[in-house]
Image (cartoon, rainbow, N blue to C red):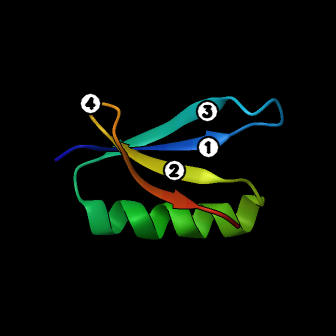
Amino acid sequence: MKVIIEWEDQFHCWRRYTLMNHQPSAVRTAKRRASSTGKRHRLVDELGRLLDLIDP
C-alpha cells in the first residue's frame, strides 16, 4: 500500500511531502518530521483516505 505524507502550512493547506510504500516507516518519518518542524502531518493512502493525523 502506498502512503503519502502531507504537512499543513500556515494557511491550513495540505502540502505533499513524500510517498512511501511501508506504513510503519511512514508513521515514524511523519512523527519525527512533525516534532522537528512543529507542523501537523497526516498520512493518506493512494485514494486520499486519511490513515493518521500527527500533531507535533
Identify the mark nearer the N-term, 2 or 4.
2
Mark 3 — residue? 14
- Does 47 appear above or below 41? above
Question: Which is more foreground, mark 4 or mark 1?
Answer: 4
In which image quadrant can residue 32 be found?
Answer: bottom right
Q: Are marks 3 and 4 in contact (CB under 8 Å)?
A: no
Q: Residue furthest front?
A: 49
Q: Residue furthest left?
A: 1
Image quarter hosting the C terminus: bottom right
Calculate the distance from the C-alpha at mark 3 to the C-alpha at mark 4: 15 Å
Calculate the distance from the C-alpha at mark 4 to the C-alpha at mark 1: 17 Å
Q: Amino acid at mark 3?
A: Trp
Q: Are marks 4 and 1 in contact (CB under 8 Å)?
A: no
Mark 2 — residue? 42
The dot on residue 7 is 1
Calculate the distance from the C-alpha at mark 3 to the C-alpha at mark 1: 5 Å
Q: Secondary structure at mark 1?
A: strand
Image coordinates of residue 25 in percent, x first then y, are 34, 66
Q: Are marks 3 and 1 in contact (CB under 8 Å)?
A: yes
Q: How many marks?
A: 4
Mark 4 — residue? 47
Calculate the distance from the C-alpha at mark 2 to the C-alpha at mark 1: 6 Å
**Which residue shows up at 61% across the image and 61% down it?**
33
